[in-house]
Every structure is written in C-alpha cells, then in structure tokens.
Image: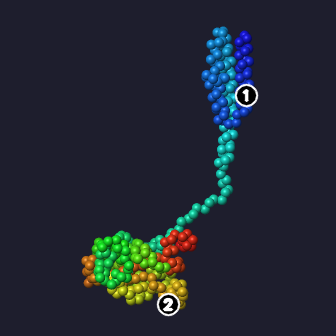
Amino acid sequence: MSELNELSEKLNGIKEEIRSELGKLESSKSVFEYRKKIFDSKTGMVGSLMREMGRIPNEMKAEYGKRVNEVKAWAQGVFEEMDEKFKAQEMRLKYESEKIDVTMPAKKPAMGYLHPNTLIREQIVDIFGSMGFDIYEGTEIETDHYNFTALNTPDDHPARDMQDTFYLSDKFLLRTQTSAGQIHVMEAKKPPIKIISPGKVFRSDDDATHSPMFSQMEGLVVDKGITLCDLKGMLDEFVKKIFGEGTSTRLRPSYFPFTEPSVEVDVSCFQCHGKGCKLCKGTGWIEVLGAGVVNKKVLEGCGIDSDIYSGFAFGIGIERIAMLKYGINNIKLLFESDMRVLEQIRE
Ligand code: PHE
C-alpha cells in the first residue's frame, strides 16, 4: 500500500507542478512546447511514468497503470483547454490587426488618356474610314527608289533638297514622307484605289514646329474621272469634322514632283472665323496640308494607264493638326510625355 500512497503523492505533485507551470504560459506555441516536454517518453515527467512499471509489485501494476492514465488524461484535457483558449485569442488578435475599414475613402485609380497624336490619328482614320478609305501601313525604312525616284524625284532632282534625308546606306533611308506608300499600293493593286496610310516619317529638321521624327497621314484615290474638285470636296468634309462645322478650305498653288497640279491646302481659321487673329497671323487662313493630282508619270511608272485613270493624293502632318487643334506651340511637347501638358488634352 505504501507504494501506492507514495505514487498518489507523486502524481499529485506532478499535477501541482503542471498547474503552476500552465499559469506562466502565454501562447499556443508555448503550450505545445511544454506539452511535448512533459510527455516525452524518456525524460518527460508524465511521459516517463510508465517506465516505472518495472519497479511496481505485480499486484499493484493494474492500479498503478490506472492512476497514471488518469493523470495523463487530465493533463491532455488541460492542455487542450489552454490550447483552445490561446488559439482563440490569437485568432482574435490576427483578425483585429487585419481588419479592413470599409468606410475609408478609396484611392482613385489613375486614369489613362489617349495621347493627342493618337487622338488626332484616330479621328482622321475614322473620318476617312467613314468615306470608304482602306488603311495601308508602310515601313519606316524605305529604299531611295520608293521614297524619291518612283515619286518622280530622281537622283539629281532639286526637290530632294526639300527634305533633309537620313540615309542608312546608298539604297536605304528612313522614309521622309508616307508618300512612299503610294507607290507600293499602286504597284500591288489596280484602280479603284482609295487608301490612307498613317505612319512615322523622318527628316533632319529641328525647331519649335519641326522634329526629326513626326507622323503623317497619306491619302490616295485613283479611279476613272477623279479631279481636283473631288479632292477639294473631300477635304472640305474633312476639315469640318476635325476643326468644326463652320470651317472650309482654300487651295493655293504649290509644287510637289509627284502631283501636277500641286496645292497647299489652307483651312479657314477656326479661332477667329476669318477675321484675323494670332493663330492665323491675321490672314484668316491656316496652312494644313499638301496635296495634288497624281502626276501622270507616277501613275505610268506603276503600270496604271493615265489616259483612263486619274487620282489625287494628300499628306497631312498629324502633329501639325494636333498643335493647331489643341493650341500647342512647340512640337516637342508632343514627344516629351510631360503629364502636365498631356492631362490638359482630353476628348
Ligand atoms: N509628301 C508631301 C510632304 O511630305 C505631302 C504630299 C502628299 C503632297 C501627297 C502631295 C501629295 O510634304
């Protein structure tokens, strides 16, 4: 009996110690670690109790086992309880720290807008698209042949000086005009032809209104009976849609080797409506593009019979239109991506 009493005392002592130790624990992790420690089958004060079995007289073994199991079950129970308590507390703290204040004002997402060049290009494409024009996209690297010679501008032609060209080699260059696309189109397709061709062009030219890289929109119509009147009528429509209903165009004689006759096209000043202001330099008119009737030599060079077919072509400077329409006085502002400038232009 004395062994059993001794055991009871020892077990009570163990319970006491566990109780007082539990009071010091502060997290589910420390509960886990303490539990592991005392249940260790070799060294733990609960886990190693069964190793004592050998020392217990046979007739008491059953009782000993029962009491040890009771202590084990009790200890499991209190650990479980502590663990649950800490876990609940820890979850609460976690939720608290991750709490979202749904009444906080939301951050406004930064909205993107189309660049003025893109806006104008898309407007021009829409306008001519609605008139039935197809789009042809040429290449920025061209041969001297397509950019000049086939456009009735042979090697020694003085008109080559009108455009300061970036040559890549004797044969290749950065196209100076989207007009190069006219030749590709006329070689590939027989009339009726009705295309626009937007794209970047390059010239060694640099001041407030010129940039070494800028964008053009070429237009080409070839069919039977096409005249300068068709060009004028179509351009009137175009300027009304871009600059406003009250605007019209005026043609002035000009020179381009690939058109004959050639014209400079002015739009009536959309700011002062012809009275004369700073924008139109007091003239009531603003120059917007170059155009003309396709030179017979160019048609013939592309295998188009100029006795049957005729056409007109025009070249619009996209940045020029954007600068006029949005009141931008330096072309560089269109390439510098300064948000203070770009944010002012929305449509
Ligand atoms: N390619 C000419 C230029 O860049 C513009 C133009 C195009 C003129 C088509 C007439 C016809 O100056």
Q: Disc 2 marks which amino acid?
A: Thr
With 327 as the anchor, is 296 left or right in this view?
left
Occupied quadrant, residue 76: top right
Q: For mark 1, what is the residue?
A: 19
Image coordinates of residue 248 in percent, x first then y, are 46, 85
Give the crowd class for mark 1: few <14, some 14-19, many >=20 residues within 10 Å. few
With 178 as the anchor, is 39 left or right in this view?
right
Between 111 and 329, the one lying in front of the other is 329
Question: What residue is at 71 percent from the left and 13 percent from the top?
Answer: 4
**Residue labelled 2 has its Cβ within 8 Å of some atom of ligand 1:** no
Q: Disc 1 marks which amino acid?
A: Arg
SS class of the residue under badge 1?
Answer: helix
Quadrant placement of the N terminus: top right
Q: Relative to 6, does residue 239 appear above or below in the rendering? A: below
Question: What residue is at 64 percent from the left and 24 percent from the top?
Answer: 44
Question: What residue is at 29 percent from the left and 80 percent from the top?
Answer: 155
Question: What residue is at 65 percent from the left and 19 percent from the top?
Answer: 49
Instruction: Look at the image and tell me whether residue 115 can be seen.
Output: yes
Q: For mark 2, what is the residue?
A: 283
